[in-house]
Amino acid sequence: MSARPPHAQEPRERDDAAHRLLTALVCSALEPALTGVLLFDLPPEHVPAVAGVFAEVLGAAAGRSPGAVPRTTLDAATAEEDLWLRPLVRRGAEGIGFTLGPGPLAETADSPPLVLVPDLARLSVPGMRAAVQLLGADTATLEHSGIRRRWTPRARWLAFCRAEDAAHISPHLLDRFPVRLGVPGLGPLPGHEPLGPLPAAWAAALSPRTPRRPTTLSDGFAASVLEHLDDREGLGHRRALALGRIARALARLDDAEERERPEPSAEGAPATLAPATDAPATDTPDAPATDTPDAPAPDTPVHVTPAHVGRAARLIRLRTAHRPPVAPPESVPAEEPPPTPRTGPYRPAPDHRTGPEPAPETGPFVREPETAVPLGPAPAGGEVPGDFSPYPEDGAGPGPDGATLRIPARRAAGGRASRGAVVGVRRARDLWDLAPVRTAMEAAKYRALRGSRGPLVIVPQDLRGYVRAPEPVRLLTLVLDHTCRGDWDWNPALEPFLQWAYVTRAAVHVVEVGARRAANELRAGSFSARSTRDPRIAAALARQGGRATPLAHGLDQAGSALRRAFRHHRTGLVEAMLVVVTDGRGNVPLTASRTGRRGSGPAGRTGTTDAVRAAERIGALGRGRLHSVVIDPGRRPYTALPAELADALGAHVIAARAEEEEEGAGRAR
């Protein structure tokens, strides 16, 4: 067997997005355990092209044409029957009839199917449960409507999602996708090869006719995998397994490329790379036996080294100690004014401090008055390229509403009068929504008069039904930042919104940030009320401000309440209003609020950055049924922070101080 060429130890890598995506798709088709591929921020118009390339790769791995690979698309309207059952037409003794057969996920085809999920964040609950059950499973069993089937899941799942929606998806579902890639700037090529041509060596490695050589792991392989991952608790072992499997697939591709390279000539001339063609290069029959390169023996193992682990980490853009994030842009001069609000989504920038150092703080998160320092502009064009993490949910995990996979109650289940809170009992007018206890008590009162000594006899006159209050179909969510008040009266600014909630009989959810005598000053408090007449709302409006401002935690709680109301409300909300009263200065990071422990160093602008990110997640809910307003108290010197927060929310800004000054000038005249 010939020696390994020196240049094969570290093969050259292309860094363009199309080649990275093609490499990830080939690794998924080559490695049996890499069954799920999740792509972030891919433009929707490129989804069909990427799905076609993946079908082409899977067809090459199965020895079939791309059209022979069955496809199944899952979306928000997917039901249980669409996944596991399929109606069939059969001819019997009595003529043509209909029967049920295994569905598309039961894998009755010879080649592995392709399951396409255009938007993972809006996938139906049956589709989510199917993904959790099948992805990464060794075996699956179906017992439904007389159908019994047992198989080994081989389907490849290709899902798409926005990075900001990852915090809204269950972590159990995200962990089932071992291959994750951020492709925000992907531009497919025109023609029938959107991601470029498939190298001949890769096609040969995918072919089922090519014998698969065994793989061996080097001594430092496991240590290299652990070095590239965080050592935080609760992450599990799926990420380490995914990184190791991607490295093993890359090692197989390197082995296939090595077999395609010609050996050096006898005179010692350097070896040249074989050009990539549409088909593997074959030996000419006239070539002498001495010039044919010796192919590796079928039982010769493929070695997976730590270098392959590093390439796998670079492929998925894993942030590690070996690859630090991209350096921030240069500092902005101190005399440059703060940034003005933009029309696009706000992206926080690093903290630029070029002026004198501020006075020492009294605590880790309690901010004292200090010299005004510009926060610095956001980088143009969104985030820095190449600084994307394949695990965006680690920045801010999913809220309580994304922790389960239960099917929410549907709006069409029963009349609206039977789904409100019970407020009384009356004589029944029909057999719907009966009160059994009160009915039995009413029949027991007349038992002696009716002369019944056996079982209790209930006549129609004894039937009693519940009286229910109507369910609110509108919601007002208030985020009150008590630390921004000072001598300002916010009641006139909030009065129109409270009046709207009173007239429309809307429910009210209040989130309090930075209240004095709070149970924990690092966390925001919240409560829900059925109407504006709840006395807790008046008490919240009159509460004094404290020291800390957990604005990020308050916005995170407001977003969780809105998502629960839209998804799990029994009647379904028609409209929701979000009113945020704040100056935008959050000095408590979201991590400190969730853990309840103060950090060791100063907060800096981490709290403000977390607040803007939480606002972006709320803005991702859409503006169809959610209307957002930010009331700006106009506190100096950081007067642009409320506008940046409103930009992230997609909200309107109300300058409360300007309205007070105009009213005061009018009274003076």
Image (cartoon, rainbow, N blue to C red):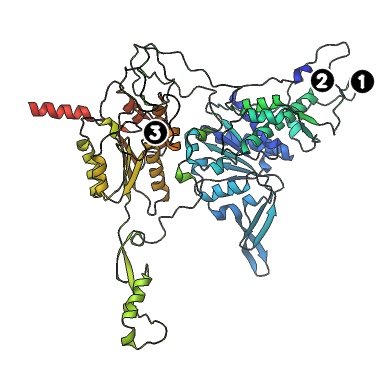
Residue located beneath label 3 in the image: 552
Instruction: Label 2: state its secondary structure.
Output: loop
Q: At 59% from the left edge and 28% from the top edge, which residue is drawn?
A: 318
Q: Residue furthest front?
A: 362
Alpha-carbon span between mark 2 and mark 3:
60 Å
Q: Position of residue 516 (x, y in %)?
A: 29, 36
Spatial separation of the CA atoms under disc 2 and disc 1: 13 Å
Query: Looking at this rendering, what residue extends furthest in the bottom direction?
Result: 451
Whether residue 332 is visible here, answered yes or no, is: yes
Mark 3 and mark 1: Cα distance apart in space: 71 Å
With respect to residue 270, does 289 lie above or below? Answer: below
Q: In the shown orientation, is residue 117 left or right of residue 271?
A: left
**Picture quarter containing residue 424?**
bottom left
Q: Which residue is mark 1?
A: 290
Q: Amino acid at mark 2?
A: Pro
- Residue 193 spot, x, y in % from top left: 64, 29
- Which of the two discs, 3 and 1, labels the residue nearer the N terminus? 1
Label 2, on which residue? 262
**Crowding near the residue tagged with mark 1, few <14, some 14–19, many ≥20 C-alpha atoms within 10 Å:** few
Q: Residues within 10 Å of mark 2 (few under 14, many from 20)?
A: some
Dot 2 and dot 3 residues touching (CB under 8 Å): no
Ranked by sequence position, the earlier of labels 2 and 3 is 2
Residue type for callout 3: Ala
Quadrant where the N terminus lies? top right
Q: In screen coordinates, is 266 left or right of 598?
A: right
Under circle 1, the secondary element is: helix
Q: Amino acid at mark 1?
A: Thr
Residue 269 vs 645, above or below: the answer is: above
- Say if 244 sits above or below 380 in the image: below
